[in-house]
Image (spheres, helix red, strand yellow):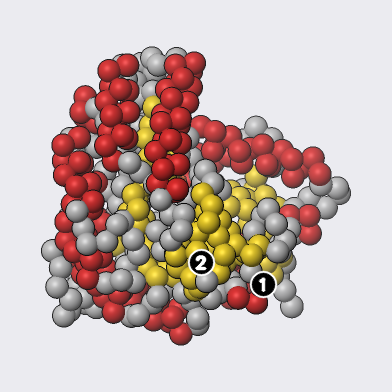
């Protein structure tokens, strides 16, 4: 008999999506049902994100909504993920109705935590570390896609950029054994997966305790060895994100040049184009260091799509600093740019600095940057018109019933008229139209 049904709603980054998949697998194995909607579930879990104030607020709004919609039989509400790790037992206070708080390393213990709540324990809290033997090797069932799989290779972060909460919510960097990663890719290949994305806060800081599984692969760093070992599995597409600029060894580009299945896309968040601000953010590199990595990527054998993140309005960011960011964007010509307004995170070193760029000014800078990016991106996307791209057919297009949607190897969205039964295939599409954030074309 099923012990009860659990619904999990996920916010935040790919790491949270991967954790939800891992939690789902553990819960199924322990005899719980997984519910597709909140209304029918006995237990509702929110896997939360804390990276900016707005992300954090979202979950509290959702809990309010859910509780309002509920009748007599109140479900058990639990919070997992980054907000849980940071806020701990305070989440039980103030009439939130929250009964379970499970930190970022408690995922594998969720079945027990839920059982305790079902048995009547009023507040169940677990902010502990992972147990040694439950480290990584969870066979994941029920991934977010039958064709694209996220594979965490490193968890946590040791960088402590002054604005960022992640080192506090995710703890120290822990790399997953290489042999396990390679086995998982091989298994996924056997199951028909077409693409894996190696994920981590900083994938290229990958440093496992031993190099078992990487023997015979040359490389300057364990990460570039891992890329070569992953390429050797013949998985059709291998992507990785996020790369930390300081640790972006040129050998990563060499590995990509050597292996076509290492996809032509690099996400390398710069955050600012001003040395003064980079220093205040404690990013560990100067603009010139960053640009030399960009040059390596631009001078590679293939064209690699480049994407980045920017924070506008960091404490003390002057107009000159901001203009330096604009110049950097013009130089790098990113395929996509994720722009964030600085959000003060309590407990981070930057939170004690005066948050002195007004909301209005942040918005002005945000819009100016967005406009510059839009112009750059338009030209990059227009260059694709007339070309053939390889696309993984993933899902129905949101806009038209007769169109399907997928990603290129360089991670661009492409829509095209297509039969639904081609889902999961890698096909060739000729691009005939460039939109702001996607391409449109037809199957060759
Ligand atoms: N590890 C990655 C980033 C992970 S967080 C890296 O260092 O590049 C994803 C993005 O959120 C960051 O790149 C940054 O642009 C943004 N971000 C993080 N903390 C923020 C904050 N306090 N305010 C605004 N944006 C933030
Ligand atoms: Fe946050 Fe910096 Fe770590 Fe990225 S590298 S997760 S921005 S502390
Ligand atoms: Fe958010 Fe935590 Fe990811 S703060 S971005 S869910 S690591």
Q: Is residue 3 visible?
A: yes
In the rendered view, does 342 fall on the left or right side of 276?
Answer: right
Alpha-carbon distance for marks 1 and 2?
A: 15 Å
Q: Position of residue 346 (x, y in %)?
A: 42, 29
Judging by the rendered image, the residue that carries numbered circle 1 is 420
Answer left or right for 94 relative to 14: right
- The reply to whether residue 14 is visible in this rendering is no
- Which residue is under mark 2? 429
Q: Nearer the viewer, residue 121 or 427?
A: 427
Lateral position of residue 118 relative to residue 390, left or right = right
Q: Position of residue 114 (x, y in %)?
A: 62, 60
Q: Quadrant of residue 240?
A: bottom left
User: Count the marks: how many?
Assistant: 2
Q: Residue furthest bottom?
A: 190
Give the crowd class for mark 1: few <14, some 14-19, many >=20 residues within 10 Å: some
- Residue 36 location, x and y as percent? 71, 62
Q: Closer to the observer: label 1 or label 2? A: 2
Q: Which residue is at 55% across, 69% downward?
A: 443
Residue drawn where x is 83% and y is 52% of the image: 73
Between 20 and 332, the one nearer to me in the picture? 332
| Residue appearing at x 73%, y 58% in the figure | 37
Q: Residue furthest right?
A: 72
Residue at 74% across, 40% down: 65
The answer to whether marks 1 and 2 mark residues whose Cβ atoms lie closer than 8 Å is no
**Element on which disc 2 rests:** strand
Counting other residues with Cα less than 10 Å from the Cα at mark 2, is it few (<14), some (14-19), or many (20 or more)? many
Query: Against 284, is 296 above or below?
Result: below
| 188 over 269 or under it: above or below | below
Which quadrant does the N terminus fall into? bottom right
- N-terminal-most mark, 1 or 2: 1
Frontmost residue, 143 versus 432: 432
């Amino acid at each position: 008999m099923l012990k009860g049904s659990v619904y999990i709603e996920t916010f935040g980054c790919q790491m949270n999506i991967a954790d939800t998949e891992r939690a789902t697998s553990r819960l199924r194995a322990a005899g719980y049902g997984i519910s597709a909607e909140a209304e029918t579930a006995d237990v509702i879990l929110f896997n939360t994100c804390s990276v900016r104030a707005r992300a954090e607020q979202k979950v509290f709004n959702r809990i309010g909504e859910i509780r309002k919609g509920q009748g007599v039989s109140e479900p058990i509400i639990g919070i997992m993920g980054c907000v849980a790790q940071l806020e701990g037992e305070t989440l039980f206070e103030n009439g939130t109705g929250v009964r379970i708080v499970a930190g970022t390393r408690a995922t594998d213990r969720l079945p027990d935590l839920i059982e305790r709540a079902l048995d009547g324990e009023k507040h169940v809290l677990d902010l502990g570390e992972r147990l040694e033997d439950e480290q990584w090797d969870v066979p994941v069932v029920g991934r977010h896609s039958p064709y694209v799989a996220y594979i965490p290779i490193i968890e946590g972060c040791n960088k402590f950029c002054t604005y960022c909460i992640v080192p506090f919510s995710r703890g120290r960097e822990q790399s997953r054994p290489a042999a396990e990663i390679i086995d998982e890719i091989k298994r996924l290949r056997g199951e028909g997966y077409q693409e894996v994305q190696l994920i981590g806060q900083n994938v290229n800081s990958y440093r496992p305790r031993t190099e078992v599984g990487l023997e015979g692969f040359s490389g300057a760093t364990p990460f570039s060895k891992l890329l070569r070992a992953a390429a050797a599995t013949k998985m059709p597409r291998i992507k990785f994100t996020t790369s930390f600029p300081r640790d972006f060894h040129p050998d990563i580009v060499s590995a990509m040049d050597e292996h076509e299945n290492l996809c032509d896309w690099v996400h390398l968040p710069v955050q600012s184009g001003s040395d003064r601000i980079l220093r205040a953010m404690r990013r560990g590199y100067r603009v010139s260091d960053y640009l030399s990595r960009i040059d390596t990527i631009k001078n590679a054998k293939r064209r690699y799509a480049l994407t980045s993140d920017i924070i506008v309005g960091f404490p003390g960011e002057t107009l000159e600093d901001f203009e330096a960011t604009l110049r950097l964007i013009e130089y790098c010509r990113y395929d996509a740019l994720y722009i964030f307004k600085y959000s003060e995170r309590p407990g981070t070193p930057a939170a004690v600095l005066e948050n002195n760029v007004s909301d209005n000014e942040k918005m002005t800078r945000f819009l100016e940057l967005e406009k510059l990016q839009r112009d750059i991106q338009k030209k990059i996307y227009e260059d694709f018109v007339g070309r053939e791209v390889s696309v993984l057919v993933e899902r129905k297009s949101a806009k038209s019933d007769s169109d399907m949607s997928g990603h290129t190897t360089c991670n661009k969205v492409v829509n095209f008229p297509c039969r639904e039964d081609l889902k999961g295939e890698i096909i060739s599409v000729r691009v005939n139209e460039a939109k702001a954030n996607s391409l449109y074309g037809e199957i060759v």
